[in-house]
Amino acid sequence: MNEVVAQKFKRLRDEMSAQNIDLVALGPTAHTQWLLGYSPYPDERMCLLLISKESEAFVMPALNANAVREHTDIEFFEWADDQGPTAALEKALAKVTGGAVKQVVLDETMRADFALNLLDKLDGAAHQFTKSTVGALRMRKTEAEYELLKLNAQIADEAQAIAAKTARPGVTEHDVAEAVKEHFISKGAKPIFDIVGANENGAFPHHHTSDRVLKSGDVVVVDIGGATKGYPSDITRMVAVDTLRDDYQEVHDVVEAAVKAALAACKPGVKASDVDKAARDVITEAGYGEFFSHRTGHGLGIEIHEEPYISASSDVILDEGMVFSIEPGIYQPGKFGIRLEEIVYMRADGPEVLSERSRDIVISKD
């Protein structure tokens, strides 16, 4: 076990001790990816990483064991298809826990059958999900993680510039997205997603990029993300095609004011719900409250969406090292949508915006 992984296990076990948790059970998911820097292939065969305060072990399908062994020296309890996982699970639990388990943390993103089969072996143990353990640790990024997120933000800034140059009359939403993907690939990044929505399509927050042809006067939502070294980008900017429609700028100014209000509210010790409220109040007071239909932001790390969620219902207290989006929007059906998105890294004195690209709308002829 290398030093980075060993330190993560120590931090996890410190949390387990503080909360009287006997066992953490993770599937082949992003939680395991974060902890080990690697996650086994996820399929229907039971694969569980079991962690107690003293020990750890994998319940491992024999089919995948050799490939996984190249990435970890954690003890395996293997099972073959003709045997089933029951005996391997029982032996792994006996080795790791050594007795009764009163409190178990379950990976909320693993298969339900893995979780239910495990609970059947724990004789009434109380269970919770990872929010207060692995999830809490993942929220606080290291400087090394910050550097990777900053790198990806710079690549995404360049991709936004490519999108703005491409968005001309006669091209399609797909054409803009393809130009973005080509830029990501040219920089060694894997394209993850694209939302390119012109005028009425931009009024759908999660529009599926289409063959709609851009025309003069369109305003286009460009929400894109790519990843290098396991960490992604996520940025949204607006592009006007050839000319700017008369009814646009007022709404853009409201969304920009909401972004600024949310950024001003971001401080260590502040509730995530208060940041959401700061953005939402600006939009509501301007008369567009009914058109802001989603939360203000989401965490970003090895996953595009992870804790902390910047929503009206979130009781997460913001802290140094957290990374999350600020992305208020106004979506007017049949007209257009506007979303402006920044990814921020929480410092002791407030948020550092990772992007260096202006949030002003770009007119594609410029």
Image (cartoon, rainbow, N blue to C red):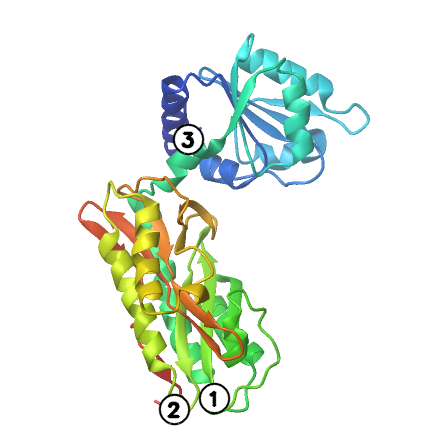
Q: Amino acid at mark 3?
A: Ser
Q: CA distance from mark 3 to mark 1?
A: 48 Å
**In the rendered image, which residue does mark 3 sit on?**
132
Q: Residue at left 42%, top 59%?
A: 233
The residue that appears at 65% across and 36% down in the rendered structure is: 111
Give residue 163's quadrant in the image. Answer: bottom left
Extreme residue toward the right, this view: 82
Amino acid, disc 1 = Arg
Residue at x-position 63% and y-position 28%: 115
> SS of the residue at dot 3?
helix
Image point (24%, 53%), residue name: 265
Query: Alpha carbon of mark 2 to alpha carbon of mark 1: how far?
Result: 8 Å
Give x and y (percent) for residue 154. 34, 64
The residue carrying mark 1 is: 168
Q: At label 2, which amino acid type do we have?
A: Lys
Element class at badge 2? loop
Tell which tag, 3 or 2, sits nearer the viewer: 3
